[in-house]
Amino acid sequence: MQAFEVADVLEERKRRAEAYREFLRVPSVSCGIYHLAAGSNDPQKPHTEDEVYYVLEGEATIHVDSDDRPVRPGSVVFVETGVEHRFHSIEKDLTVLVVFAPARGSRR
């Protein structure tokens, strides 16, 4: 078994000053914490894997393909492989649990 405390992952991400901190990686899935400060720009590009976002804290809008949707703690968003997406209008610091399937970067 692998088990993690989100608080520990959040602290490690902050300590390392990383926007994205991966904490689990096996061939079929990877998980990480993604953080964007209020007012910042999300630089991500489409990924080669399916992706699920679970908003832990903050408020923003996510743009997926041609749709925009506000997100807040508890929001869950699925993004298919290769689809344009990004967070914008980040009103409050945004922290998101990210799940990639298969593992992030494994289809490059």
Image (cartoon, rainbow, N blue to C red):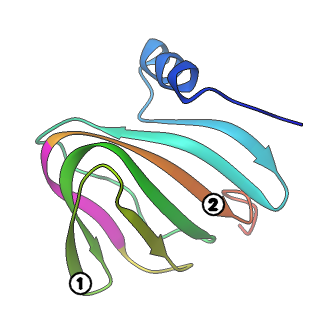
Residue 85, numbered circle? none
Q: Are marks 1 and 2 in contact (CB under 8 Å)?
A: no
Left or right: 102, with 20 as reference point = right
Q: Quadrant of residue 17?
A: top left
**Residue located 45% across and 28% down the image:** 18
The quadrant of the image that shows the C terminus is bottom right
Report the amino acid beneath label 2: Phe
Residue found at the far bottom of this picture: 66
What crowding class fits label 2: few (fewer than 14 Cα within 10 Å), some (14-19), or many (20 or more)? many
Q: Which residues are magenta?
A: 85-91
Left or right: 33, with 26 as reference point = left
Q: Is residue 90 magenta?
A: yes
Whole-percent x, y for residue 73 in the image: 30, 49
Left or right: 102, with 52 as reference point = right
Whole-percent x, y for residue 104 in the image: 66, 56
What crowding class fits label 1: few (fewer than 14 Cα within 10 Å), some (14-19), or many (20 or more)? few
Residue linked to disc 2:
100
Residue 67, numbered circle? 1
Q: Marks 1 and 2, how far apart in space?
A: 21 Å
Name which of mark 1 and mark 2 comes first in the sequence.
1
Residue found at the far right of this picture: 1
Whole-percent x, y for residue 52 in the image: 52, 64
Q: Nearer the viewer, residue 1 or 48?
A: 1
**Residue located 32% across and 84% down the image:** 65
**Relative vertical location of residue 59 with respect to residue 70 in this rendering, above or below:** above
